[in-house]
Image: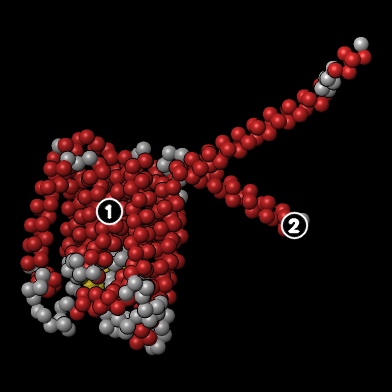
Amino acid sequence: MTTLEGSRRPAPARGLARPAARAARTAARAVRGDAGTRGATAAREVTALSYYLVGGATLLLLAIGVVMVLSASTIESIRANDGNPYADFLGQVKFVVVGLPLGLAASRVPVEWYRRLAWPALLGALAMQLLIFTPLARGQGGNVNWIYIPGVGQTVQPSEFLKLALALWLGLVLARKGRLLADWRHVLVPAGIGCLLALGLVLAGHDMGTVLVMLALAGGAFFVAGLPMRWFGVAGVAGAGAAAFFVAISPSRVTRIMSFLGAGDADPTGVGFQTRHGLWGLGTGGVSGVGLGASREKWSYLPEAQNDFIFAVLGEELGLLGTLVVLGLFAVLAVGMFRIVRRHKDPFAQIATAAIACWILAQALINIGVVIGLLPVIGVPLPLVSAGGSAMISTLMAVGVVLAFARSEPGAARALASRRGVVRRSLAVVGGRRRG
């Protein structure tokens, strides 16, 4: 009896076993829940990736641009502003300070409001462009594409804002057409007529560079809208013929084209002066550059160093590495924008985003192509980097519109709200610890 009782194992106390098992199950659920939360957070972050790519690349390009404008403009500013090296730089900062809040405001506007604004925006931009035929018009370098605002003492380039208006308007009208674009009549009315009117008004001011950028903008919109490829072939042939005609009737354009082809004047101080010094600047920079602020070309050797040829100064001071960083940021911007085109469910947002993407990226490629000698001198700024008022403000507003579309991607609004919630909770914890 004693032996049998001694061999028995004591039964576990139920009162102790149940809480332990319950705690184990609770811990397991907590681990699974934490893993699920991390997975859900990561998934939400991916859905908002377009927003971060576009916004991050824009801010970095803008920061590089502000620094490079300061460096490239100091010498000319000293000569033109009674010894003040920061006058041109502060003017550029003014435009950035105006453009950033406008871009931020544009990123918060609902997509539906952009549909409502498309027609008024286009009509207003066309009315502004018509002012180049009035006494308010101002010209530079053969182009008459600026208007003077009395009482403010500021000139505005209306064609820059016409780009944004045209992108929104094409997004609206082409999204409504849909499959009807297989019929040439639906291609022509109203989208084709509207594009021709906008291009004609800009071309009347002799701004061939802006016309090329607007053609890229319209091409991107029509491509995403589903225009049959045969129409692009027809448009390409017609566009090449029109470009040849407008070049032929302008002696300055003929001279630039002949110099680019090597059939013109070989005088190094002649028409090829700007391109040659741009290439010298890039070549001098090497891999790592001569150092920020140490450019030699900006000492009145390179015309428009802070505007159309700022990429040459950037390559001279920051070298190949600096130029690759800028090219990489434009690539990130392209990935973010075309990701919106691919993922968004609204055809209006897809087409308008494609138009804005082709505008900014084509302008960047044209500017860089001119600086490295692959294209004749056309005269378009490098978006977000070059000095300029209207171009900077309109580009920041266009990026804001794209960010508004990115916020309305599937799942993006929830992801962004979740991120803001995490930030608020983190700040609350930090604040609580400080108070303790």
Q: Answer few, some or many: residues within 10 Å of disc 2's Cα (few below 14, many 20 plus, some between 14 and 19).
A: few
Q: Quadrant of the N terminus?
A: top right
Placement of 342 over or under 29, stated as above or below: below
Note whether residue 165 is visible: no
The percent position of residue 12, horizontal first and vertical second, equals: 82, 22
Q: Is residue 389 left or right of residue 12?
A: left
Residue at 19% x, 41% y is: 227
Residue holding disc 2: 435
Q: Quadrant of the C terminus?
A: bottom right
Placement of 38 over or under 433, stated as above or below: above
Residue at 7% x, 62% y is: 245
Q: Is residue 308 left or right of residue 15?
A: left
Q: Answer few, some or many: residues within 10 Å of disc 1's Cα (few below 14, many 20 plus, some between 14 and 19).
A: many
Kind of element beneath mark 1: helix
Q: CA distance from mark 1 to mark 2?
A: 51 Å
Residue at 83% x, 20% y is: 9
The quarter of the displayed image where residue 47 is located: top left
Viewer-proximal residue among 54 and 209 = 54
Residue 346: assigned label: none
Residue holding disc 1: 358
Residue type marked 2: Arg
Note whether residue 256 is visible: yes
Residue type marked 1: Cys
Q: Outermost residue toward the front?
A: 3
Q: Outermost residue toward the right?
A: 2
The percent position of residue 194, horizontal first and vertical second, equals: 21, 50
The quarter of the displayed image where residue 116 is located: top left
